[in-house]
Amino acid sequence: MIETQEQKDISNAFFKEALELLNSSESDFMLGGAFAMFNYTGIFRNTKDLDIFCKSNEFPKILKHFAKHGYKTEVTDVRWLAKIFKGDYFIDIIFDTVNNICTVDDTWYERASIGEFIGIPVKFIPPEELIWCKIYVQNRERNDNADINHTLLKYGKHLDWHLLLRRLDQHWHLLLSQILTFQFVYPADYREIIPKWLFDELMRRANEQYDLPPPVEKVCRGPLIDQTQYEIDIKEWNYKSSTITTI
């Protein structure tokens, strides 16, 4: 949908007011979502929401500050998400992910990118954490694989790949899957972006799986990436879920 100039002006006014209030709340926060994507890829996406990342001990202060200035606030899910509303616009205050894997901590702030949005200095979540969060979003209604591929294409040469592997070490299959998809999508580019050592290491792990005995417990890890489409596995097919979190 093409945004009119009037709509753009209204959006920018909301975003600017929101960021000014966030700064005046004296909270430590980082910008994520569509605007972090724009920072790392140059891709602009029309949106009516602002994704703010912070540690869990910061969000109560932010909510109270906005409530004092007339905004509607809610603790959507105490495990990972709160929201702030003004008309058709809203702010997501994110301090974890729905699967409780990507918990915001001090290391995010230490490596955040410094930039500017609507003329206001801001911190953007680090690109490695942007990918880390997005790689678990593979729902039927929303799949962030293309966002990750675009981030790799435009920013992959600057990534800390060792850190990204550490972030995804427990679920390295997802990183290998993403790399293979990137190879498929960009056959002329992946050699210059994806480190060969990383591909070799992940393929070694994949091969090694066949040398191990099958797990005693039948586990379905599908709910980590889609909280609805794998319900049948847990409820009817007697698989154990690797997560008990639901939206």
Image (tube, rainbow, N blue to C red):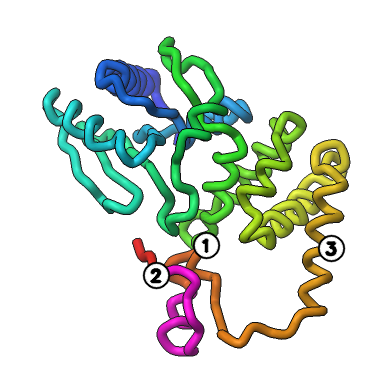
Tag 2: residue type?
Ile
Circle 2 packing at 10 Å, graded few (<14), some (14-19), many (20+), is few
User: Disc 1 marks which amino acid?
Assistant: Ile
At 41% across and 84% down in the image, what residue appears? 235
**Rendering coords of residue 31 (x, y %):** 44, 29
Question: Which circle, 3 or 1, is nearer the viewer?
Answer: 3
- Against 193, residue 75 (above or below) is below
Which amino acid lies under the numbered mark 3 shown in the image of this protein?
Arg
Marks 3 and 1 sit apart, C-alpha to C-alpha, by: 23 Å
Of residue 143 and residue 94, the one placed in the foreground of this image is 94
- Secondary structure under badge 1? loop
Residue 82 placement, left or right of 70: right
Instruction: Depth check: give the residue in front, 23 or 119.
Output: 23
Specify the segment rendered in magenta. 230-243
Q: Nearer the viewer, residue 104 or 38?
A: 104
Residue 244 tag number: 2
Q: Is mark 3 in CB contact (under 8 Å) with mark 1? A: no
Where residue 16 sits: x, y (%)?
33, 17
Looking at the image, residue 43 sits to the left or right of residue 93; the answer is right
Q: Are marks 2 and 3 in contact (CB under 8 Å)?
A: no
Q: Is residue 64 visible?
A: yes
204 in relation to 152, above or below = below
